[in-house]
Amino acid sequence: MTDVDATSGPDVAWLAPGEPVDLENCAREPIHVPGSVQPRGVLLAVSEPDLVVVQASENLAGLTGVVWSDALGRPLADVIGVAPAEAVVRSASAFGDLRERNPVEVTLDVDGDPVPTDAILHRAVLTGARDGHGQPDDGEPVTNLVVELEPARGPRPFSFPNTYQAVRGTVAALNRAATLQELYDTTAQAVRDLTGFDRVMVYRYDADYNGEVVAEAKAAHLNSFLGLHYPASDIPAQARALYEKNWLRLISDVDYEPSRIQPVAHPVTGQPLDLTYSTLRSVSPIHVEYLQNMGVRASMSISLLREDRLWGLIACHHYSGPHQPPFATRAAAEFLGSTLSLRLVDRTAEDEVHRALQVRSTLAWLTAATLDEDRPLADALLGGTSLLDVLPADGVTATLQGSSGSKGEALPADVVERVVAWAAARGDDVVATDALQQDAPHLGVPLDVACGVLVLPLPDGQYVLWHRREAVRHVDWGGDPHNKAIAEREGEDVRLSPRKSFERWRETVRERSQPWTPQERGEVLQLRGNLLEALYARSRSIVRAAETLQRSLLSEPPSSDGLEVAVRYVPATREAQVGGDWYDVFCQPDGATMLVIGDVVGHDVQAAACMAQLRGLLRGIAFGDGESPARVLTRLDAAIDGLGLGAMATVLVAHLSPAGDGRARLRWSSAGHLPPVVTGPDGTARLLAGERAELLLGVRPEAVRTDVEELLAPGSTLLLYTDGLVERRHGGFDDGIERLGRVLAGTRGLPVEEVSDAVLEQLVPDGAEDDVALVAVRLRG
């Protein structure tokens, strides 16, 4: 359909210079640096600020009378004349984008004859520039002024500043247009009237960049292309990328002979000049052949953008011979394209707002329905106003808080189970396909049961599933899209060339449902948030009870004459602010102090309830009888097994008692928990040696537990903590301990309350990934 040349991403493996191009490798053609221009004008690359010509097209003499080889190294004024050069310099010296002031209208003196000429300016950034020693230049970006000179054949229709006047009536018509089709048709006819092309089409892309002709203005004798589709391969990705940068492209004569740029390698970079923003840039031979196969003698394209992304083109074709609208005419046509783009954005936004208001109203109604906690949530969402009003489909199935239901066509239970499991395994908030048999053939879902599905996976195996039937449709292509190439023999060689048939070719599309649009996906994503809030709200009484229980258990420690004690608990940043981490500090009858830190496996109400059970059991076992920490853990493990609690937890129990001279004896045992950290009076932090490898509770009740003893000097600080303090998803335990040691070293002399706050502030400044509990104990000096 249109020009097959553009820049692409940095990872493209470009073809080597001179390597033949065919349909097998054209996507790798370095078309932004073709090394040549169309001969309707000439190109000069001029260094700045000295304004010396460093590159020129070989056809320079035909317009300026100066041979290209004589122009190199000479000031611009010597090549195009003093007055034209001054006009170019004045425009290039002004602030802003040069392209907004194009063209610079100059008159060249060619053998004594005045030649009105449009000078079209832009700056090319010289990537890979080198300094005077041949090394990469890491300073300010180096640019060249690119001057393209195009003879203004015939009278200029209007000056560039008055472009709006030329299209004022059309802009008013676009503003009055009531439908998208009216916008398309008005633009196509206006561009044809303005430019004189035989055929002007508005060409729109779908999500896969297949194009469709949605409007057309043409000469009466031409057959219509309206409604035809063209495959994405007709306009490769690199071409689409350039259309987003250079909005207008003219090929005035497809039979042109390219004029090479000399020297081929830029003297500063050693690379061909980047012609991404050039108006004369030579085009791919594959595209020229494509146009010739269509019978096109001249073409022009104008980009249609939405949020700087290409969504379509205005494509212009001429069949009766070369065709070269003046630059100002082309600029006016480009202005129309920009206006159409803006109106389309406005119209699309209006449609989206209208639908969004409808969906918002439905969501508000459904949200209100979920507040009735005496009614199962699935029933509330599948009543008169239902989930099918949020997202049109043939049926919807939901399982929420243990209740299930459906509306519309019901899916077999085994199909629902397979599809939901597949969607949950994808790990996305929204999983959608309009071709289930192609995307998940292993599910074995019959085509007549469901062809498209959209699933909202929710926590704890809950879900909402919409499904759509197959929607058979017919697509009219401009030629067979599956036969886009033909074999051409060239002497001894055979190469692939663009197809020559563009007759209407009808394809029947099967095994696809109506697609799930981006707007629909966004709406169900909003619904997902509402559902999560409803699920949370319905379980809030349970959560509040768990929070109340947890806060009551995680109480302030008892006071002691010989110890300063501080405790902290920070829940993980998640919806339910309850978990299985806990601490405990209590005094024994003999004056010793018991310190406990633990972490139940899990992060939910069940984990919090289990934590409360273990804390109570441990207190009952440990209080009063003077048993060692290891013996306390052994008995607690036996109780978990004997009572059938099914709990698993890491726990550390420590017994702290006076040892004379202000010292304290620490005896502790760990069931798979992290070892304590002690900071000495001098501020040095160390990790106490222990047996973290011992089994956590709830795995093997007969596991042998051991005690570890340590004498602590007066002024020492003991820190017990859970793994949320030091372990990170992308970092190990050793790294966390090292960070903890640095923090503790910087808190020497601070009260333990301030030490605890400093540890949390510096190790979990943005909230914890996991629950954090800690106990800090200071031996008074």
Image: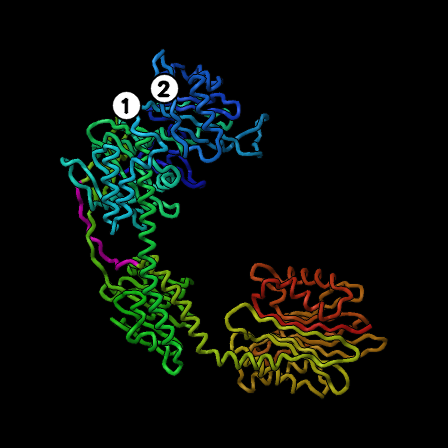
Say what amino acid the circle numbered 1 marks.
Answer: Gly
- Does residue 385 lie above or below 634 as drawn? above
SS class, disc 1: loop
Which residue matches tag 1? 154
Residue 346 in view of the camera: yes
- Does residue 379 lie above or below 330 as drawn? below
Q: Count residues near mark 1 (Cα–Cα under 10 Å), then give few for <14, some for 14-19, many for 20+.
A: few
Q: Position of residue 232 (x, y in %)?
A: 30, 44
Magenta run includes residue 405: no
Which one is nearer the viewer's eye here, 408 or 631? 408
SS class, disc 2: loop
Which one is nearer the viewer's eye here, 775 or 436? 775
Residue 622, by quadrant, is: bottom right
Which residue matches tag 2? 59
Which one is nearer the viewer's eye here, 190 or 663? 190
**Residue 530 appears left or right of 628:** left
| Residue drawn at 59 percent across, 59 percent down | 731
Highlighted range, magenta:
503-515
Which one is nearer the viewer's eye here, 486 or 356? 356
Q: Position of residue 225 (x, y in %)?
A: 19, 42
The N terminus sits in image quarter: top left
Answer whether labels 2 and 1 touch (C-beta < 8 Å). Answer: no
Say what amino acid the circle numbered 2 marks.
Answer: Asn
